[in-house]
Amino acid sequence: MDDTTREAVRAFYRLLKATSAAASDPHHSGAEETLSNAAYEANAAMDAAGLLGRPPHELFDLVRQEFPDFNPNA
C-alpha cells in the first residue's frame, strides 16, 4: 500500500470511529464538529488516493490491512 492510500485508509478509519462516537452520544457538544472534520479529512484523502466511490467492502478490506483487529460490525 502506498503512502497516499495508507493516509486515506487511516482517515477513513478515523471517520468510522467519529461516526460511531457521534451515534453513541449525538448530544455531545463537539460531536457534530468532530464528525464534520473527520468527513472532510477522509473525503480529501480518499479523493487524493482515488478511493472515492469504491464499494464499502473494498474500503473495509483496506482498513483491515492497516488495522487487523477492525470489525465493521462491532
Image (spheres, helix red, strand yellow):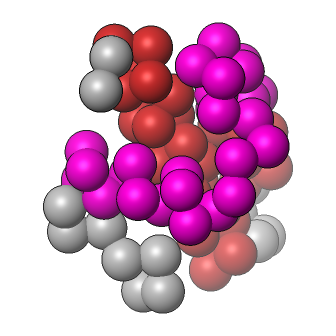
Residue at the left extreme of this rendering = 68
Q: Nearer the viewer, residue 44 or 31?
A: 44
Question: Can residue 70 be seen?
Answer: yes
Callout count: 0
Left or right: 37 with respect to 20?
Answer: right
Left or right: 70 with respect to 24?
Answer: left
Query: In terms of image quadrants, where is residue 10?
Result: top left
Residue 49 shown in magenta: yes
Residue 40 is situated, as x and y percent measured from the top left of the image, at 76, 28
Left or right: 19 with respect to 10?
Answer: right
Q: Nearer the viewer, residue 70 or 39?
A: 70
Query: In terms of image quadrants, where is residue 44?
Result: top right
Left or right: 21 with respect to 9?
Answer: right
Magenta: main secondary structure equals helix
64 versus 35 height, above or below: below
Quarter of the rendering occupied by the C terminus: bottom left
Residue 46 is situated, as x and y percent measured from the top left of the image, at 64, 27
Which residue does the image show at 25% across and 45% down from the upper left?
66
Which residue does the image show at 31% across and 67% down from the upper left?
70
Residue 9 is situated, as x and y percent measured from the top left of the image, at 45, 37
Question: Can residue 25 be seen?
Answer: no
Query: In terms of image quadrants, where is residue 1?
Result: top left
Q: Which residues are magenta?
A: 40-67
Residue 43 shown in magenta: yes
71 versus 62 height, above or below: below
Residue 51 is situated, as x and y percent measured from the top left of the image, at 65, 33
